[in-house]
Amino acid sequence: MENSWNPDNFDNKEETHTIFEAVPPNRTSVDNILRLNYSNQLRLTLMADTKANIMITVSSIVFSITLANMESDMLRYPLMSLGFFSVIALVCAIIVIMPKINYPKNEHGKIDKASPFYNPLFFGHFAHIPIKEYKEEYAKRLMSDEHIIDALTSDIYGVGRVIATNKFKYLRFSYMSFLTGLTGAIVIFTAQLLLT
């Protein structure tokens, strides 16, 4: 995933619509595959958010229990390990569900519609343009099947990029951190039992 947000990975230029010229119009299978792919992306987003919420709950409970039991000499170091990694897991899980609504800006701080990252179908982008401009942008995409397919595939690609490079990446960090803390606490506790 190196250089995943490289502008070369995105293209919103008019000539890219020619990629889809060879796709026959009025094919139900094309509509179905786009719909299926888009709904799968949304399901993956929902799944990542649900798992992140679970990790937030579990990490918060574990951290609270850790703080409440720090007085015990035998449990102090295992709980410190578990508490430390629970906080890291908590932060990573929060990053997963934190909304990302950045938009490409020009040098004046206005939305940059020439940017390869600009997507008029994304609410975080079209919220910064007037409704008339939004309708014009949308109408451009409805002019032909190639434009519609290009707009949908670009949107699917953008959503997939966010899922792969942000949501699932930090969700994995969250789970790995929690697992590391749990393993560390067990190892430290076992070592203390064997050494005493």
Image (tube, rainbow, N blue to C red):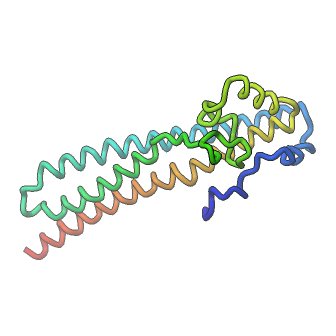
For the point 54% across and 40% down, the residue is 101
Q: Quadrant of residue 143?
A: top right
Numbered circles on residues, count: 0
Image check: 61 left or right of 17?
left
Q: Position of residue 40 (x, y in %)?
A: 63, 40
Name the residue nearer the viewer: 92 or 26.
92
Looking at the image, the residue that sits furthest to the bottom is 195
Name the residue nearer the viewer: 145 or 54.
145
Image check: 114 left or right of 143?
left
Name the residue nearer the viewer: 107 or 8.
107
Image check: 117 left or right of 94?
right
Looking at the image, the residue that sits furthest to the top is 132
Q: Position of residue 23 (x, y in %)?
A: 89, 42
Q: Position of residue 38 (x, y in %)?
A: 67, 38
Q: Looking at the rendering, in which quadrant would you find the N terminus?
A: bottom right
Name the residue nearer the viewer: 108 or 149.
108
For the point 30% across and 58% down, the residue is 85
Q: Position of residue 6 (x, y in %)?
A: 66, 58
Q: Is residue 179 above or below residue 143?
A: below
Q: Looking at the rendering, in which quadrant would you find the C terminus?
A: bottom left
For the point 76% across and 38% down, the residue is 151
For the point 11% across and 52% down, the residue is 69
